[in-house]
Image (spheres, rainbow, N blue to C red):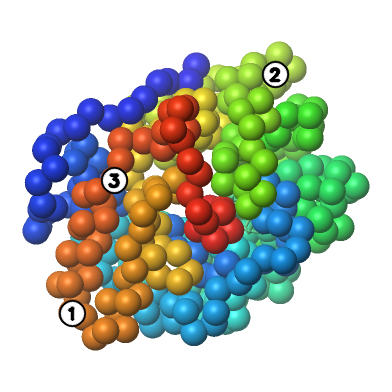
Amino acid sequence: MISSVGMPTRKRSASPAPADGPLVDTFGRVHTDLRISVTDRCNFRCSYCMPAENMTWLRREGILTFEEIERVARVLKGLGVIAVRLTGGEPLARADLPVLVAKLAAIGFDDLSLTTNGVGLPHLAQALVDAGLQRVNVSCDSLDRERFASITRRDALDAVLAGMDAAEAAGLAPVKVNVVLMRDVNDDEVVDFAAFARKTGRPVRFIEYMPLDAAHAWERPDVVPAREIVERIDAVFPLEAVGSRDDDPAPADRYRFADGRGEIGVIASVTDAFCGSCNRLRLTADGALRNCLFATQESSVRDLLRAGSSDADLEALCRRVVWSKAAGHGIDAPNFTPPERSMSQIGG
Ligand code: SAM
Ligand code: SF4
């Protein structure tokens, strides 16, 4: 069953960040995974992420150029980052994305992936593969057209399914499917999504709903605990755990169907946080480095870049940001306040 990694214990006192060695925080967590948001804009308005209207967008000149992103990524590669995932907003809404993918691929990360709502994939999948993209996760929260439209505020289920097909046809297999489950919204589809994983061979990742919605409407009872998701699927399609979270910093707890027909994963961001093994750093579209989705502070790497700073200055900033990482997201703490920016503004 789901292993409990819990909160880390502090290894070092709050001394200055180390000047060399791996990108480490005061709890000894080594950071090797970078999420890059390339835009805060999106063609969907998912209710758990964005408001229906009146979103305030970042100004274009405030958004990092591809050359600026490339420079930060190169500095972080030098500090031990091996995996990069592009996200947003909707990353495929950023013009010429394959150009950025080619720049990042040339840096030579072990893993270069993308999270998308999928609508742009029929048009872009081949160009992204040609540029060096290795993997893709496509978000899809309902297999029912009307419900999909009500969650995303766009009638686009068929377009998203076509996007998954296009990704596979371009060689991005396996296409993983991200599903945010919300109580009494789409949790009745949990077994349908398991059947979808079995039928298509696409691993489905069920993500617990987090308090990162623009409306600040999240409430704890809206969360469908990962353990419940596993139990409900296991009752219909028996599951076997694959590996253990203790051996793998990836946030998903993976399960294969006992009859060998595919797999699912659950991301227990709320009920069984993986903070203890978190190895992730985030770069927002406007160039803020964040050490956690829930961080209440961030540091502008863009300002350093545009002030003509050296790579050594950028490196020192990256080290400080990681060093100042908190033990965990603290959702259960009585004084928890969600970050000012919502999910699409940070980059999920
Ligand atoms: N637009 C792309 C997409 O939807 O895949 C990439 C950006 S989106 C912010 C990245 C992931 O975050 C998606 O899988 C989305 O479902 C998830 N997400 C957004 N808001 C969330 C929330 N409040 N709780 C949990 N996951 C969320
Ligand atoms: Fe857009 Fe992704 Fe947020 Fe949905 S979850 S509104 S597709 S950024």
Which is more toward the observer, 197 or 80?
Answer: 80
Which is more toward the observer, 243 or 190?
Answer: 190
**Mark positioned earlier in the residue sequence (3 or 1):** 1
- Report the Cα–Cα distance between label 3 and label 2: 35 Å
Would residue 140 be seen by someone viewing this image from the given angle?
no
Residue at image position (57%, 41%) is 211
- Select label 3 or label 2 by which is in front: 3
Q: Amino acid at mark 1?
A: Ser
What residue is shown with label 2?
232
- Report the Cα–Cα distance between label 3 and label 1: 24 Å
- Select label 3 or label 1 by which is in front: 3
**Mark positioned earlier in the residue sequence (3 or 2):** 2
| Ligand 2 found in image quarter | bottom right
Q: Residues within 10 Å of mark 3 (few under 14, many from 20)?
A: many
Which of the numbered marks, if any, corresponds to residue 217? Answer: none
Would residue 322 be seen by someone viewing this image from the given angle?
yes
Q: Residue furthest top?
A: 235
What residue is shown with label 1?
310
Q: Secondary structure at mark 1?
A: loop
Q: Amino acid at mark 2?
A: Arg
- Select label 1 or label 2 by which is in front: 1
Disc 1 under 8 Å from ligand 1? The reply is no
Residue 181's place in the image compared with 100, above or below, is above
What residue is shown with label 3?
325
Residue 236 pos. (x, y %): 74, 17
Q: Secondary structure at mark 2?
A: helix
Residue at image position (60%, 24%) is 225
Q: Residue furthest front?
A: 335
In contact (CB < 8 Å): disc 1 and disc 2 = no
